[in-house]
Amino acid sequence: MKEIRLLTCPGHGPAARFDRLTDLPSQFSATAVLAGDLIMPTPVNAHDHGYGIRTLDFGAVDDALEMWIPGLRLRPRTDPYLEALVAFGRLAKTGVGATIHCHNSLNVDRLVDEAGAVMRAAGDVGIRLALSCPLLDHDAWAYDGGPQRLKPFLSADDWQALESTVPSYAPISALLAAVEAVAAANSSQLVDVQYGPIGPQWCSNALLEAIAEASAHHNRRIHMHLLESPRQRIWLDRRFPEGVVTYLDNIGFLSPRLAIAHGVQLRPDELELLAERGVQLVTNPSANLRLRSGIAPIASALEIGGSVFAIGLDGTGLDDDQDLWREMRLLYLLQGGRNLTRRLTAQDIFDAAIRVGGQVINANEADDFTIIDYQALIAEALFYDLDEAEVLLTRMSAKYARGLIVAGREVMRQGELTGIDFDAASSELGAQARADLPRLEKQRPLVRALSAATRAYYATWPGIS
């Protein structure tokens, strides 16, 4: 018997079942729901970078984080609107209708225009968007001294070529003003503009303190990377003898307005402090594994009490496919523990993906739904009363997502986006990227030299191998 299932709180109880579409709540009456489908609140991708051209495609092969970062210099120059359109379209096709976009440009003079293009792309696709505006004023080349630390590990010619690319940074007042300008230009109820300090290792104390003050003044959320890699842990402990999390608390940075991505290297005392302040931890299992950062202490955070976490793809996914459903499964398995009772439950996973994810994008009251071909998931099942949340965590992937409804708009129907021609956009973006190949080919030797120098530099640190 093919019923329609409405699973309003995955992990909290079974789905309600309906024999006919007309029996469903009225908001589904005009949608393409079929017998055998399951409808559930859409999960949120709570940390991402909007890669229309994915990192592997321009040669940034997985590596330890700091050695991988130089590869981002090979990102092709493309239209920001088209880049975001493809990234958001790819995500929507998986049945996910809300995401954080940590914008990638570091040029404050272009931020307002590029952010406008990104917000327009989100509107055309039809998804909810939290736009994290990048903020930094410290060099991203190497911790503990910037570019000069890498000079001994580079040839004279490579150093001369790379030295000219060391960026200059805008004053703090200009950085914060740019964020407010982006917010003022935002005309969509589905977009939330946030401060995006890239990470404390790339921000001065003055910038971090200014962001904390501005966040409180404007009641604006902050989204930041924190303690992703072992090398960040070592260096931040040098810079902040009292502990970086304690420092952030002392300046008023920690609050329910803050979400931190990764947090792989967090200690129990830091997890406890973050929980006390209502901070959300966004975990990125695939990215943490692919960039050799480790496994975040999510189960430990929950056991401490009061901690909340969300789930993000960070532009990757285990199969490089932006499939949040598989990311949820990976987290479920990684954090299950070895005891008779699960450390992380199905309820924990779905609460993270839906409820806490909504908090991270500042859309707690979102009324968005994904339609799933549930009958295909249980086609060979002998029992019809299996726990739907367990079925989803065991078998769900993007290919079973049939529909997506965001704020009453049908964004995807029968697996196809309704607002854009995704294939045409993807083809055009690829053409733009290939047109930039001559410049990228010239850059590749320098990027490889920078990555090798970065590896040699960190190898000199005690305790790093």
Image: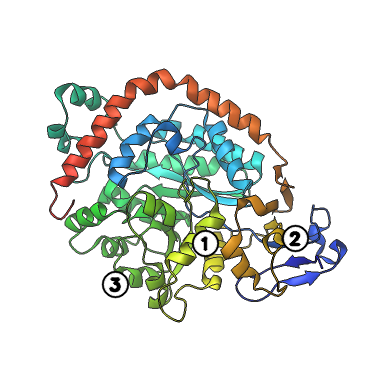
Quadrant of the frame with the N terminus: bottom right
Provide the residue designation for mark 3.
269
Residue 329 tag number = 1
Q: In the rendered structure, which disc, 2 or 3, sits on the residue that comes first in sequence?
A: 2
Q: In the rendered structure, which disc, 1 or 3, sits on the residue that comes first in sequence?
A: 3
416 or 78, nearer to the observer: 416
**Relative to 205, residue 153 above or below:** above
Mark 1 and mark 3 residues within 8 Å of each other at the beta carbon: no
325 or 262, nearer to the observer: 325
Mark 1 closeness class: few <14, some 14–19, many ≥20 residues within 10 Å: many
Q: Position of residue 458 (x, y in %)?
A: 18, 45
Label 3 sits on what residue type?
Answer: Asp
Label 2 sits on what residue type?
Answer: Asp
Label 1 sits on what residue type?
Answer: Arg
Provide the residue designation for mark 2.
37
Q: Is residue 297 left or right of residue 49?
A: left
Q: Distance between the residues labelled 2 and 3?
A: 44 Å
**Relative to 159, residue 320 above or below:** below
Colouring of the image: rainbow
In the rendered image, the residue lying farthest to the bottom is: 340
